[in-house]
Amino acid sequence: MGATAHSVIERSAIRKVSVRLVPFVALMFFVNYLDRTAVSFAEPNGMGRDLALTAAQFGFASGVFFIGYIILEVPSNMALHKFGARRWLARIMVSWGVVALLFTWVQNSEQLYTLRFLLGVAEAGFFPGAILFLSQWVPSRHRTKVLGLFYLAQPLTTVIGAPLAGWFINQHGLLGLEGWRVMFLGVSIPAILLGVVAWFYLIDKPADAKWLTPEERDWLTEELAAENAGKTGADEKSSHGREALKAAFTNSRVWTLALIYFGFIYGLYALAFFLPTIINGFQEQFGTTFSVMDKALITAIPYLPAAIVLFFWSRHATRHGVRTWHIAGPAVVGGISIPVALYMGSPAATVAVITVTACAIFAALPVFWSVPSQFLTGATAAAGIALINTAGNVAGFAAGYVTGWLKDFSGAYYLPLFLVGAFMLMSAALMLWLANRSNGRGADHGRPLAEVR
């Protein structure tokens, strides 16, 4: 086949995957993240008062979700590798949708803790499963672009989800429910419906995709097979569960990436869970008054620029190759900006600096997730990606609980957000260290990470 024909088939195949699969999986992620963070909208809009929650109790309720997620994350991703993404992702969505629906009738902090834990159990494996699924559909040179498009769902969840949550909360009295209960009802039903659709819509691998031409199917299958040869997990022995787990859990790069991801996710969830509460505090701090919808729209402000930066940062990484500074640079910016936000003299200035932090976090994340599949494949990739994401879920638990506890202890958000900054700077330092060590010589931050060994 000539080079021109080969290029045409490649472009056509990647375009079809990007149009057919990525938006649907991104929509699943949108609903996933909205259900996961819905408590952050409910707490300052009646739930905290009705359930008599302290900041520490709310922080624990936010974070206990991740305990159940952590326990089942790796087993869930191994099950996805065994049973296929179509069945497993659909099962996850229906399960968490049913649990999310039960939040509508929560009556006290103990029930809230229980449902948050069960929500984590139900959602376990969704995010790393989605990353693994999309990584198995495109070669590495297209992966950053595809994961970037997928990751747009996360900041857009707040851009669209915050006003949507505010609209639901304003429907106070619907079906005899408080506004925050109406919100839980409204955001849970889409998960159940999407899960049913996913069962029929998703396809496990390119070879089974009837919407690809035979030439496109052959090209994707052969390209992915050639690329996976020689990676950790490519040998037959590593395709078995125990060997795959051992290969992933003994890989030093996997553990280093897990720590890097911990720092980013600590910052992400500290913002996600407490930004609405911080904005609610503007009323006392600056003597302003905001309606429920005002607060929802202000919460959404940092995430629209973050989505734009994410798109163009991922596009740059795709065109020029993923490099160390694509990940370490945003970590430095985020680590410095987040504590600075608390020293601003107005709501507008505070939100502007928080916007810089959000842009930094979201710029790095899709680029980061293109790295593990550069050296892992098969069941080992499933275990390794799940292990890295487990570190993120540990950070999610810690960010919610520790931020709330330190706020109660110190009386303000200064100390907990300085800690957020420290963890993000840790991620930057580890990324630089990993690149330097893997290159086997002095720092060369312009080298593609695909060369990191």
Image (cartoon, grey):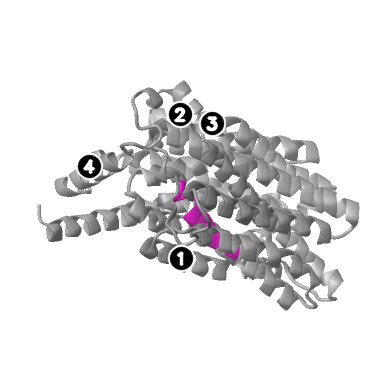
Q: Are marks 1 and 2 in contact (CB under 8 Å)?
A: no
Residue 365 in the image: x percent, y percent?
A: 53, 55
**Disc 3 target residue:** 249
Give the number of marks. Answer: 4
- Precedes in sequence: disc 2 or disc 3: 2
Residue 52 in the image: x percent, y percent?
A: 85, 48
- Precedes in sequence: disc 4 or disc 1: 4
Would residue 83 be found to the left or right of residue 122 on screen?
left
Q: Nearer the viewer, mark 1 or mark 3?
A: 3
**Disc 1 target residue:** 311
Q: Nearer the viewer, mark 4 or mark 3?
A: 3
Would you call the spot at circle 3 few (<14 residues within 10 Å), some (14-19), or many (20 or more)?
Answer: some
Residue 33 in the image: x percent, y percent?
A: 57, 51
Q: Nearer the viewer, residue 449 or 227?
A: 449
**Disc 4 target residue:** 222
Three-letter code for the amino acid on which mark 3 is drawn: Phe
Q: Quadrant of residue 375?
A: top left
Q: Nearer the viewer, mark 4 or mark 2?
A: 4
Q: Secondary structure at mark 3?
A: helix
Q: CA distance from mark 1 to mark 3?
A: 32 Å
User: Is 9 rendered above or below residue 384?
Assistant: below
What residue lies at 62% left-to-right and 45% top-to-bottom?
Answer: 259
